[in-house]
Image (spheres, rainbow, N blue to C red):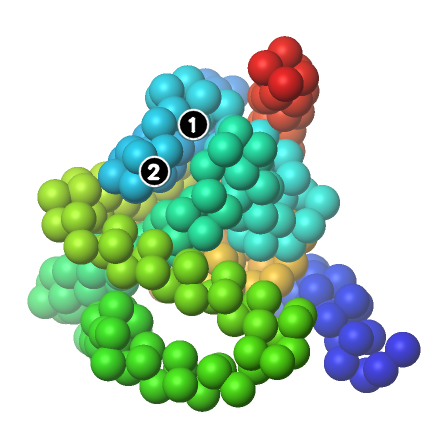
Amino acid sequence: MTRSALVKRWGPWILMAATIGLLVCFLDLRAALDAVDDIEPIAIVVTALLYLLDRFSMAYKWNVLLRARNCWLSSWAAFRIYLASGFIGYVFPASVGSDTYRAARLSLCGCSVSRVSATIVLERVLGLLAILSLSAIGLRLVVAGGRDDLLPVLGAVLGALFVGAVLTVMSVSERLYGVFRRVTDGFASHRIAHRIVQILHALHDEYVALSRGGRSLLLFFVLSVLNQLIQALMVVPVLLSLDANVDLLAVFALMPLSKAFIQVMPVPAGIGVAEGAVVVALSLANVPPAQALAVALVLRAVDLSMLLPAGVAYAADAWQMRKTA
């Protein structure tokens, strides 16, 4: 087995183990567990309800893109598929596994793979821009309130937002993509390579067609911002239960960045990485590290508890497919 294959196979697991090791070494695990014991059950229940609301809102906004490309799903069907994809995300890398499941699942219903994949790609792109936009606005207000120590973070977010916006515009440029088409024309004589290039061309064509639906994209972007607010709100009941001195503005500005970081890390279900990202984000919001880790552990516990409804959704979806086959 080549070195690159070994890294691809074991790299995510090594990263997960290294992140967990760093958390154990540098944080007071006993204090975090003691803090977990102090959390009121009602706070955990509210967090779980917000988790389900988050899943529904993510499914709803994805369905906006699907309907813009004539892939019609009911809100319940979209929610069921999205919830089931979370179950798959615990087996494969968090974003890749769930995204692949959604594309493959709808292809069985007759939807074009390239069409569905384009909605998922645009979902990720616009979702990231929504995260950066929300964080940029929130951090600007936090810095204006006297948190000069967050100026470097604000600068990094603004830089990432600018680069992301430029790359997004470039991705729908026919002139720039024309260069790629000319370069790949030489693969016509190679059957497998030519097939891969054809799939990329089809995906790009669908992506460009979808990006021209201004009204749908605006609605999706607004829903993405609301979705990030829901995700940030999930930590608030736990923090309040811990009697933490919560700077809500800083929490809403920094927590979305942790979600963006998790999406780009190839770790199954983001285990370890998600907890580390939450601890860093909440620590920057002046939450004590032990309490920040306690919040991260509660979020993980809620996420694990949702494997039951996710598994039920997966089974129900499989039954629905067998029924309509």
| x and y, in percent, of residue 2 in the image | 85, 82
Which of 158 and 122 lies nearest the eye of the viewer?
122
- Quadrant of residue 154 in the image? bottom left
Number of marks present in the image shown:
2
Residue with the most extreme top position: 323
- Quadrant of residue 315 in the image? top right
Residue with the most extreme right position: 1
- The C terminus - image quarter: top right
Callout 2 touching callout 1 (CB < 8 Å): yes
| x and y, in percent, of residue 206 in the image | 34, 55
Which of 10 and 134 lies nearest the eye of the viewer?
10
The amino acid beneath tag 1 is: Ala
Q: Which residue is mark 2?
A: 66
- Quadrant of residue 172 in the image? bottom left
The amino acid beneath tag 2 is: Leu
Question: Is residue 31 among what the camera can see?
Answer: no
- In terms of secondary structure, where does tag 1 sit? helix
- Position of 143 with respect to 292 (left or right) is left
Residue occupying image coordinates x 15% and y 60%: 137
In this view, 255 is above or below 57: below
| x and y, in percent, of residue 285 in the image | 33, 58
In this view, 76 is above or below 189: above
Q: Which residue is mark 1?
A: 78
- The N terminus - image quarter: bottom right
